[in-house]
Amino acid sequence: MLRKILIANRGEIAVRIIRACAEMDIRSVAIYADVDRYSLHVKKADEAYSLGADPLAGYLNVHRIVNLAIATGCDAIHPGYGFLSENPELARACARRGITFIGPSASVIQRMGDKTEARLAMQRAGVPVTPGSPGNLASVEEALATAEQIGYPVMLKATSGGGGRGIRRCNDAAELHHNFARVISEATKAFGRAEVFIERCVVNPRHIEVQVLADQHGNCVHLYERDCSIQRRNQKLIEIAPSPQIDEAERQYVGGLAVLAARAVGYTNAGTVEFLQDADGRFYFMEMNTRIQVEHTITESITGVDLVEEQIRIAAGLPLRFRQDQITRRGFAIQFRINAEDPKNNFLPSFGRISRYYASGGPGVRTDGVMYTGYQVPPYYDSMLAKLVVWALTWDDVVNRGTRALRDIGVFGIKTTIPFYLAIMSHPDFRRGRFDTGFLEAHQEELLGYSSKRRKDHIAAAIAAAIAAHAGL
């Protein structure tokens, strides 16, 4: 078994991995930029080492992180999610230096990180994919010709994209022509590669993803699906397991597709296969995330499986402890990403000092987070402060529990997405379990508390106030 793990990450996922290490009697090593000196993961790790003043460069420095792992006597590195988690160079560097990388092989990371290569691999394995370009696009003319063939609307995507970046919907040829150079620019800046491809847009689909675990002994299982349809601009906000929108036959079918996909590329460790489900119930492969997901918590809630512990066990060479028929699910779980954002100000980040904070509690409630009273939210990273997870036996019960848990939280000094989530939980369509990726866009005004009439009233009041002020009244 592994003895000491360096966590090449920060924030709540670093805290999550530290807790798993503690339960497995494994020493944990944290790394931090100076701005994170007082972060929770630094406080909780057995050891912590500074990466210097730059808030980003240290977390992205492969060779410095591997050297630090060796210098501190670590025999493994856990990348968490984000940063270097899907960078094959970290896995390669670990292999060269004799460090265990807690994740899949570098070749699989690279293969699945290239979305056109991933699509081809799935097609060869018999996993359905949306119609699109056979590879990367050489020119805007090729993009236009492909779109004409498969039909509008289309999605123009960065080949190395992730996290909702480098994606543009194009409803006609004019939009495709306009967005082509923009997506290439976004892809180059975000991922260092200019390649893009195109595929048919599945309009307002359900976003269904399946958690898989695969060991080094040929065993591969799925742990059911998560519904990630509640999202804004391709960024997930609320995740649910299992989906209240698919039946048992669909559940078994998409779970089987995920295992087929993982086996097709020789996958090991924890991974997620993401699908889109159209209005007719058809599933299409979208991508495979070769790491632990932000929303792994809800899979843990319904199955009782500690996914981070399983990651560590698999990386250590141990076989899975269960077969597919031994994995059971119970109830429903919802995860809310508590972000430091102001929903009523176009979701602008709200950084600063948390003057007071108290967590939610009670039966079936879990909070994975980094904030505490006095914590200074830095402006350099993702705005997520915590993940609130609730579980209950039925869909109605978990919605009610989620509403209660959201009301229990107290975060003062900054704006958060909590009020926005409360509005979603009270929406009749959500309560009935009816939603897709277009849900927030379709209901944004009412969810933000502004009906069209109220907006007109606000505008009229503002104009009247301006006229009065100008007149000196």
Image: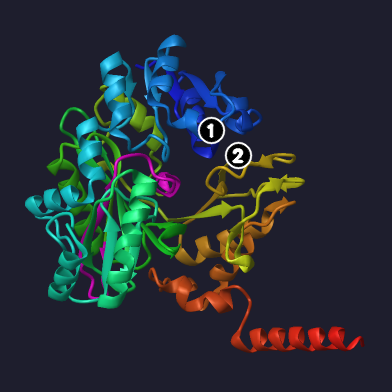
Question: In this orientation, does residue 378 appear?
Answer: yes
Three-letter code, disc 1:
Val
> Which label is found at residue 63?
none
292 drawn magenta: yes
Image point (24%, 27%), residue name: 319
- Pick out the residue farthest to the right: 473
Local SS, label 1: helix
Mark 2 and mark 1 residues within 8 Å of each other at the beta carbon:
yes
Quickly name the residue at label 2.
370
Local SS, label 2: loop
Q: Is residue 212 above or below residue 403?
A: above
In which quadrant is the N terminus drawn?
top left
Three-letter code, disc 2:
Val
Q: Residues within 10 Å of mark 2 (few under 14, many from 20)?
A: many
Question: Whole-percent x and y of residue 322?
Answer: 26, 35
263 drawn magenta: no
Q: Residues within 10 Å of mark 1 (few under 14, many from 20)?
A: many
Label 2 to label 1: alpha-carbon separation: 8 Å
Q: Is residue 461 above or below residue 178?
A: below
* Scheme by which the image is coloured: rainbow
Image point (40%, 74%), residue name: 434
In front of the other: 79 or 359? 79
**Left or right of residue 333: residue 269:** left
Q: Is residue 456 above or below residue 314?
A: below
Q: Which image quadrant for residue 44? A: top right
Residues shaded magenta: 276-301
Question: Whole-percent x and y of residue 110?
Answer: 23, 38
Question: Whole-percent x and y of residue 119?
Answer: 17, 53
In front of the other: 5 or 393? 5
* Disc on the earlier residue, 2 or 1: 1
